[in-house]
Image: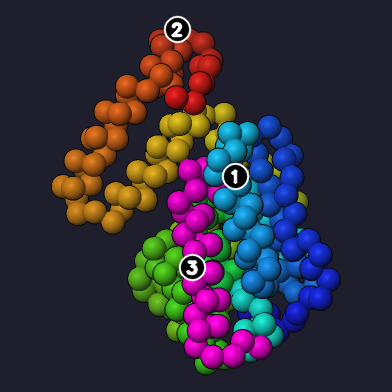
């Protein structure tokens, strides 16, 4: 969490396409350690909403400017809010943003350096994939200031084991990148100097797949997690059947048999 309020947030979020098919969104409040102000969350929400319907975007990378990934909510802004309704709006805005990442029909990869704390850790946990610099650190330290990280808890508890999540939530202690990879909060820790290159390489690999297949798979993955086992298998069988009838699946199988690269149509 950050106690700093950056007054120079002319562009709290930067967007660029480093390669075809890849959208890179950069949290751009470096003086505030990219704390999630309402303006930054609104900008990120708008960028994700735009990416949803943009066929040129196949994968989204979420990274940050400055010395750290995200310090959580902007505590100065939080303390300035008066009353139950204002605070509820803030946390509902954040919850909607995190759910939008999960619901986006394109994979989102977190590229983490420095510290991801509180809602910043929640942001990492909400992404489909995450790579972190070996020097990166993660924490849910709300308990240290009398504010339990209840909303970060939702994403955290769905990505790491219960006891490991509770340890982070109850102690507020920092976990290094190796520990974050061990408990499943991130996919892997990489050398600091290789973070951007390896994140791009992962995004490039995913962007080379059929966008229809990736969209189908991401949606099915999250939906079946909430189902009982038998219902999940019934649902997955339906998804597999529909997927098999898609043109891209037929093209992919034909290309495999004919030993040639597939040409995806996205349908």
Mark 1 = which residue?
51
Mark 2 = which residue?
258
User: Which segment is the magenta one?
Assistant: 80-108
Q: Is residue 108 above or below residue 7?
A: above
Q: Residues within 10 Å of mark 2 (few under 14, many from 20)?
A: few
Q: Earlier in the sequence, mark 2 or mark 1?
A: 1
Secondary structure beneath dot 1 equals helix
The number of numbered discs placed on residues in the rendered structure image is 3
Relative to residue 213, is residue 198 drawn left or right? right
Q: Earlier in the sequence, mark 3 or mark 2?
A: 3
The quadrant holding residue 162 is bottom left
Q: Is residue 117 visible?
A: no
Q: Earlier in the sequence, mark 1 or mark 3?
A: 1
The quadrant holding residue 189 is bottom right
Q: Give the image location of residue 185, x and y in percent.
A: 49, 61
The quarter in which the N terminus is drawn is: bottom right
Q: Mark 2 touching mark 1, by CB under 8 A?
A: no
Asked if the stretch drawn in magenta spans residue 101, the answer is yes
Q: CA distance from mark 3 to mark 2?
A: 47 Å
Residue at the image position 45 percent from the left and 38 percent from the top: 215
Mark 3 = which residue?
95
Q: Give the image location of residue 254, x and y in percent.
A: 41, 11
The numbered mark at residue 71 is none
Q: Is residue 236 visible?
A: yes
Q: CA distance from mark 2 to mark 1?
A: 34 Å
Residue at the image position 66 percent from the left and 43 percent from the top: 23
Residue at the image position 68 percent from the left and 47 percent from the top: 24
Q: Residues within 10 Å of mark 1 (few under 14, many from 20)?
A: some
């Amino acid at each position: 969490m950050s106690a700093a309020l950056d007054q120079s947030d002319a562009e709290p979020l930067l967007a660029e396409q480093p390669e075809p098919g890849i959208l890179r969104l950069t949290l751009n409040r470096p003086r505030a350690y990219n704390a999630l102000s309402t303006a930054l969350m609104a900008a990120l929400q708008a960028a994700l909403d735009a990416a949803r319907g943009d066929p040129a975007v196949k994968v989204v990378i979420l990274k940050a400017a400055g010395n750290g990934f995200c310090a959580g909510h902007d505590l100065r802004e939080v303390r300035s809010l008066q009353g139950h309704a204002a605070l509820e709006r803030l946390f509902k805005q954040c919850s909607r943003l995190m759910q939008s990442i999960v619901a986006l029909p394109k994979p989102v990869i977190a590229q983490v350096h420095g510290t991801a704390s509180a809602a910043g850790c929640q942001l990492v946990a909400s992404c489909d994939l995450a790579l972190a610099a070996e020097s990166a650190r993660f924490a849910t330290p709300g308990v240290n200031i009398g504010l339990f990280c209840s909303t970060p808890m939702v994403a955290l508890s769905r990505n790491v084991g219960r006891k490991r999540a509770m340890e982070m939530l109850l102690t507020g202690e920092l976990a290094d990148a190796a520990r974050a990879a061990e408990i499943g909060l991130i996919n892997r820790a990489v050398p600091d100097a290789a973070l951007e290159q390896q994140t791009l390489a992962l995004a490039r690999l995913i962007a080379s797949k059929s966008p229809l297949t990736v969209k189908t798979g991401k949606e099915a993955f999250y939906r079946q997690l909430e189902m009982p086992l038998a219902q999940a298998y019934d649902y997955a069988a339906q998804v597999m059947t529909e997927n098999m009838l898609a043109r891209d699946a037929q093209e992919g199988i034909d290309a495999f048999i004919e030993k040639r690269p597939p040409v995806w149509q996205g349908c």
